[in-house]
């Protein structure tokens, strides 16, 4: 993976180099934390409602992994939770080597469907007992063996996540090698 990353970063195509630089910027920023990612429009809706909602008022066609109906919905959605990234002990190279089928790169630096994304850092202490770490969520999923999960790095909060649990936020655009701090 490290060789692939070096090769990708040294590729002559400016798009590939820019994507690599942006991915590394985002990974450096999110490392060690708990994060939620969303579109800029959805971020504005989150701020207006005062919380990240488990079932926001958006069409299923705009949500992750819904094309095959409820049986294929992500595990966290089935639990009535908000999906989070647990990057507290994340190493992209070793993770990708161990779990090559994981879709984390669909979201970092931004969701492949979007041109930009907003990353929201979450204070898990504020969430209290509703927070389920990536490892704990994976253990729970294994016991139930159903629906989709991003092993180890997908965490959850059962119920809405209030804005007062936000520690920081930044926006990332696929054509700019910078992170834009966001205040709310």
Image (cartoon, rainbow, N blue to C red):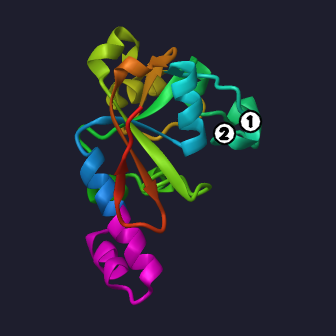
Q: Return the x and y of residue 137 as percentages of the image width and height.
A: 41, 26
Q: Quadrant of residue 49?
A: top right
Look at the picture and state if 68 lies above or below 160.
below
Question: What residue is shown with label 2?
Answer: 63
Residue nearest the observer in this picture, 130 or 17: 17
**Residue 112 shows up from this direction:** yes
Look at the picture and state if 74 lies above or below 95.
above
Q: Quadrant of residue 128?
A: top left
Residue 20 lies in magenta, yes or no? yes
**Residue that extends furthest to the front in the rendered view of this protein:** 183
Q: Secondary structure at mark 2?
A: loop
Q: Do the numbered discs 1 and 2 sit on residues whose CB atoms are within 8 Å? A: yes
Horizontally, residue 3 falls left or right of residue 62, namely: left
Residue shown at 51%/27% (left/top)?
47
Horizontally, residue 90 falls left or right of residue 76, namely: left
- The span shown in magenta is 1-22
Residue shown at 36%/70% (left/top)?
20
Residue nearest the observer in this picture, 47 or 129: 47
Q: Secondary structure at mark 1?
A: helix
Residue shown at 25%/45% (left/top)?
31
Q: Return the x and y of residue 34 as percentages of the image width and height.
A: 32, 33
Q: Return the x and y of residue 79 as percentages of the image width and height.
A: 56, 19
Residue 55 lies in magenta, yes or no? no
Quadrant the N terminus occupies: bottom left
**Residue 145 shows up from this direction:** no
Q: Main secondary structure of the magenta part?
A: helix
Q: Residues within 10 Å of mark 1 (few under 14, many from 20)?
A: some
- Which dot marks residue 60? 1
């Amino acid at each position: 993976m490290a060789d692939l990353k070096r090769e990708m970063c040294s590729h002559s195509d400016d798009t590939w180099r820019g994507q690599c630089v942006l991915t590394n910027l985002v990974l450096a920023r999110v490392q060690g934390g708990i994060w939620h990612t969303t579109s800029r429009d959805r971020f504005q809706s989150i701020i207006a409602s005062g919380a990240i909602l488990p079932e926001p008022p958006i069409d299923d066609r705009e949500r992750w992994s819904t094309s095959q109906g409820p049986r294929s919905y992500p595990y966290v959605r089935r639990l009535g939770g908000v999906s989070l990234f647990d990057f507290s002990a994340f190493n992209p190279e070793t993770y990708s080597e161990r779990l090559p089928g994981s879709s984390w790169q669909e979201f970092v630096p931004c969701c492949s469907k979007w041109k930009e994304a907003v990353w929201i850092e979450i204070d898990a202490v504020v969430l209290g007992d509703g927070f389920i770490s990536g490892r704990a969520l994976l253990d729970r999923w294994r016991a139930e063996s159903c629906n989709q999960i991003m092993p180890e790095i997908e965490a959850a909060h059962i119920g809405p996540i209030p804005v007062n649990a936000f520690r920081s936020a930044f926006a990332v655009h696929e054509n700019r090698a910078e992170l834009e701090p966001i205040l709310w």
